[in-house]
């Protein structure tokens, strides 16, 4: 595989950075991968498991001489990290990020990028509910989308190189403008996460009424919400605070639809419900046909071996 960026610096060493490190090693994409995380604990774990070639004690040491710098911290921390690394960035280097929101990251990071350094924001649409330096794996990006969001004046040749790099990591790549990215992600990721958080919160309140039945019978549908609602609280707090307008727009529409369904139940309008569910079922089919999920029953989960029922 062609090495586009010999020296890569990963700032933040969690799920996404870890998966990039594993993916780069799998494909032989770099001659040196350096990493930095703010806490000594994370740096210690990264060094212990050999997540990157060099774990640096300062962010400056990690980015100095790097050909590619990837910001893998929560969206709300991107601006301060950019300000810190700006003075030591190598001329001609590429700075990208993996943040789940794009307009706010561009606003926070772009002003710090020095002349002669290329800033090309990005967002791999791949993740799990796990976080931290032990959670990454090389296959995370395989056949998933990575969206590149070039800023005004982004060099087309540099964008093309970054596209190839993500393809080498296993991704399919698309290019979007920031506002469109944020709206699409509000529909496909941000609003669904908020709805899952809400549903799990409601069930948690009800648990006090139903004892442990919510947990015991969770496989009836609730369990799939709990997976999403177990996602990292810092990351998701930042997503909602920085993609406010698009998320509120989608939640407004969601509420209207919810009221319409509520009314259909109240008025016993079975046709409305049946038509609605027929339409949504087709969307699931589309996701499977696009290779973005498995057709296996129950998401391909291995059947559980008999476990102890929770205390009642
Ligand atoms: P993660 O596993 O929680 O790792 C986050 C890393 O950022 C950790 O190394 C953490 O350092 C560091 N960090 C946290 N707060 C910081 C701060 N205020 N200043 C400097 N560093 C800080 O997170 P992740 O899932 O890899 O997410 C990283 C980025 O990818 C986020 O912007 C997220 O929006 C985006 N993303 C996530 C997913 C997903 O599903 N998880 C998918 C696509 C994109 P310590 O460990 O030392 O605290």
Image (cartoon, rainbow, N blue to C red):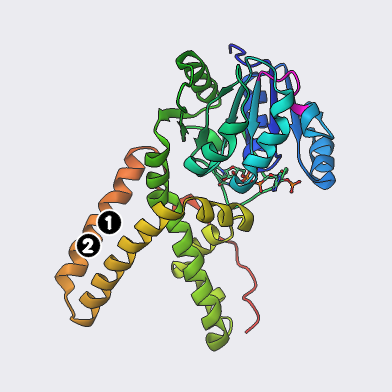
Q: Which residue is mark 2?
A: 276
Q: Is residue 112 magenta?
A: no
Q: Which residue is mark 1?
A: 280
Q: Quadrant of the N terminus?
A: top right
**Rendered residue at 41%/29% (across/down):** 174
**Rendered residue at 68%/35% (across/down):** 83
**Rendered residue at 53%/34% (across/down):** 141
SS assignment at label 2: helix
- Distance, label 2 to label 1, CA atoms, is 6 Å
Tell me whether the residue at label 2 lies in contact with that at label 1, contact meaning CB atoms closer than 8 angstroms: yes
The stretch in magenta equals 62-67
Q: Is residue 204 visible?
A: yes
* Residue farthest top in this picture: 2
* Residue farthest bottom in this picture: 209
Q: Is residue 294 visible?
A: no
Q: Is residue 65 magenta?
A: yes
The part of the image, by quadrant, that contains residue 291 is top left
In the rendered image of this protein, does residue 183 appear above or below residue 270? above
Q: Residue 299 versus residue 35: which sits nearer the camera? A: 35
Q: What x and y, as percent, mark residue 50?
A: 79, 32
Q: Which mark is residue 297?
A: none
The part of the image, by quadrant, that contains residue 112 is top right
Mark 2 beta carbon near ligand 1 (under 8 Å): no
Q: What x and y, as percent, mark residue 165?
A: 55, 21
Q: Quadrant of the C terminus?
A: bottom right
The part of the image, by quadrant, that contains residue 109 is top right
Q: Main secondary structure of the magenta part?
A: loop
């Amino acid at each position: 595989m062609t090495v586009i960026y010999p020296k890569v610096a990963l700032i933040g060493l969690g799920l996404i950075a870890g998966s990039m490190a594993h993916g780069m090693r799998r494909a032989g994409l770099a001659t040196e991968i350096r990493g930095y995380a703010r806490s000594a604990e994370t740096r210690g774990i990264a060094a212990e498991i050999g997540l990157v070639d060099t774990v640096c004690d300062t962010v400056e040491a990690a980015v100095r001489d790097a050909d590619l710098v990837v910001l893998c911290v929560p969206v709300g921390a991107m601006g301060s990290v950019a300000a810190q690394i700006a003075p030591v960035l190598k001329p001609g280097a590429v700075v990208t990020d993996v943040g789940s929101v794009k307009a706010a990251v561009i606003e926070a990071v772009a002003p710090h990028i020095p002349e002669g350094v290329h800033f090309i924001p990005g967002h791999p649409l791949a993740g799990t509910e796990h976080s931290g330096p032990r959670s990454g794996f090389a296959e995370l990006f395989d056949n998933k989308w990575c969206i590149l969001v070039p800023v005004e004046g982004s060099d087309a040749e540099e964008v093309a190189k970054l596209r190839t790099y993500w393809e080498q990591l296993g991704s399919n790549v698309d290019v979007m403008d920031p506002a469109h990215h944020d709206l699409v992600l509000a529909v496909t990721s941000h609003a669904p996460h908020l709805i899952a958080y809400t549903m799990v919160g409601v069930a948690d309140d009800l648990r006090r009424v139903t004892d442990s039945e919510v947990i015991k019978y969770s496989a009836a549908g609730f369990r799939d919400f709990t997976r999403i609602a177990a996602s990292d609280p810092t990351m998701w707090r930042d997503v909602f605070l920085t993609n406010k307008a698009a998320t509120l727009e989608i939640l407004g529409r969601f509420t209207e639809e919810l009221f319409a369904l509520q009314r259909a139940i109240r008025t016993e309008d079975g046709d409305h419900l049946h038509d609605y569910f027929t339409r949504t079922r087709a969307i699931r089919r589309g996701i499977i046909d696009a290779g973005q999920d498995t057709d296996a029953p129950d998401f391909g989960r291995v059947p559980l071996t008999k476990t102890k029922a929770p205390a009642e």
